[in-house]
Structures are given as C-alpha cells and as structure tokens.
Amino acid sequence: MLILPDMPYDHPLVVFFMTLMIGLCIGSFLNVVIYRLPLMLEAAYSSTDKEASPDSEQEPEIPSPAMTLAWPGSHCPACKRPVRAAENIPVLSYLYLLGRCAGCKTYIPVRYPLVELACAVVTVATAWHFGPTMQTVGTWLLLWTLIALFFIDLNHQILPDCLTQPLLWLGLFFNSFAAFVPLREAFWGVAAGYAALWSIYWICFYFTGKEGMGYGDFKLLAALGAWFGWGPLLHIIVLASTGAAVVGLWQTKVRHRDPDQPMAFGPYLIVAGLAALVWKEQRWLVL
C-alpha cells in the first residue's frame, strides 16, 4: 500500500496540483463557452429579427428549447452522441480517443486540448508567482476571459458584450484596491482605450469608406485599460496593428486571401495587451 506523506495545503506540490486541476477544469468549461456562446447569441438575434418582422402568411413555429451553457449535455456536434464522463477528462480523453469522436470517429478540433492546456499553464504560473493574493484571483479572471475572447473572435469575429463588459468592471473593481494600477489610471485607461480605437475607426471610415474594426474591439481595449491603466495602451495599439498587418499581408501574398475579407482584430489586441503588460511589469518576467 502506497502511503503519501502528510503535506500541508501550502506545500508547493499541493499548490501545483490544485491549481493545475483548477486550470484544466476551467479550460474544459471555456471550451463550452467558446463553442456555445456564439450559437446562443446567433439564436437570440434571429429570434429578435423574427419578432420584429412577423410574416402573417406563415404558421407560427413551435419554439425549440434554447441552448444554454448547461443544456443540452456535452455531445458530438456531428452524430449527437452524448459524451460520457470518461470521455470528458481534460486533455487525457483527447489523447485516449486519438482526437476522434468515440461514436462516429469525426475529428475533434485540436482547439479543445489547447484551450485546456493554456488555461492550466496560466493558472499554475499565476498562482506560483503571486501566491494567495488578490492579484492571483484577478489575473485568473482576466486571463480566463481573454482566452475565451481570443478563440471566439478568431472563429466568429465577434467579441460578446457579455464577456467584455464584465471584464471592464472587474478591472475597475480590482484596481479600486490598487491590485494592479491605481484606480485613477484604470479609469483613464477605460476612457482612453475606447476613445483611441473609436477615433481610428471613424478616421479610417472617413477616408476609405470601410469599417476597419468592430465596436467590440473598442470595448476590449477599454477593458484592457481598466486592468493595465492608460500607460501601455499606445504600445498595445502599435503591437496589435503591426501583428495584424504582418499576418494579413502573409495571408494575402502566400495563401491568396481576399484583402477585402474581414479579419478578427481582437486576438491581436489580446496578445499585444499581455505582451505590453509583461514588458511594463518586469516582475512578471521572473515566475
């Protein structure tokens, strides 16, 4: 019989495994959010459009139960087969199933284990660096939300208000205790973040007649300003714009992508925001 040593809860190994499990479980939930939230928003918008313009010649349809984050249970999108508990273990189930559905053998997107692993890494690294502090909780909420926003915008080119707006208010809440920057800087970070991209949007629209970005990008940068303050905002905009320009040029020249095709800007803002934070806060470089 294997007898484990009696270790206190603050032992490094205990902290590591606890935060690792938290990160993997949150990552599994984020996969649900990334997949279902855009579908839920699309269904809500379509139902609103039908109510706004009713067609009297059509018979009323019986509404189907609305999808939520909790209903229906996890299932394969292709064959609708329910996912069993043993097939829903973060990362391990994907490896065991060789990246395929146990029923119809349809490929499971590699995004699922990547989100779980990314969430686990940032959760462990944050707890390891900050310890049991308010900064740990705040950084967890920030990074978890940014991971969800990154993949939602990458796949659907939307940044839902139900994620960006709570992220903004959470930043102001934590910085009311000066967890990351003083509240004064956070307040002006919100105002400057929204105004900067709003101004760029209208300048581009005035000279080109095209919408260079969506309003969700304004709100995302405002949320980043609530967490980081106004100081790094210029760096965030420059880094994000440079990254988007390089990737867009590569896709146009190498992959022959239509230059007029819309491209998500949110992922570049998120990566640039985290890079600017690491550059500004030198202590983040040493975990």
Image (cartoon, helix red, strand yellow):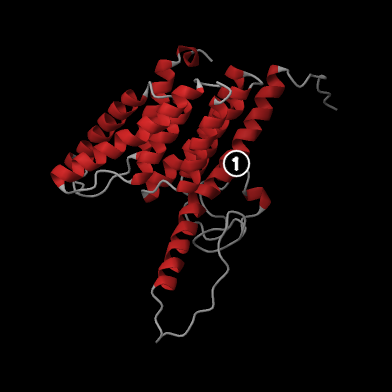
Q: Amino acid at mark 1?
A: Pro
Residue at the spot of label 1: 90
Q: Is residue 89 left or right of residue 204?
A: right
Q: Is residue 72 above or below residue 172?
A: below
Residue situated in front as seen by the camera: 249 or 133 = 133
The image position of residue 84, as x and y in percent, is: 65, 54
In the image, taking residue 13 as reference, residue 219 lies left or right, namely left
Query: Is 271 above or below relative to 97?
Result: above
Residue depicted at 46% across the width and 41% down the height: 164
In this rendered view, identify the residue nearer to me: 159 or 91. Answer: 159
Q: Residues within 10 Å of mark 1 (few under 14, many from 20)?
A: many
Furthest-left residue in view?
A: 207
Towards the viewer: 209 or 120: 209
Residue 62 is left or right of residue 256, and the answer is right
Quarter of the picture holding the C terminus: top right
Q: Is residue 114 visible?
A: no
Residue 150, position as x, y percentages in the image: 42, 40
Q: Quadrant of residue 247?
A: top left
User: In the rendering, at what x and y percent does residue 144 appear?
Assistant: 53, 36
Q: Secondary structure at mark 1?
A: loop
Image quadrant assignment for residue 139: top right
At horizontal 39% and vertical 49% (from top left) the residue drawn is 158
| Any part of residue 21 in sight | yes
- Residue 215 lies in quadrant: top left
Residue under the point 28% across and 27% down? 238
Q: Is residue 82 above or below residue 112?
A: below
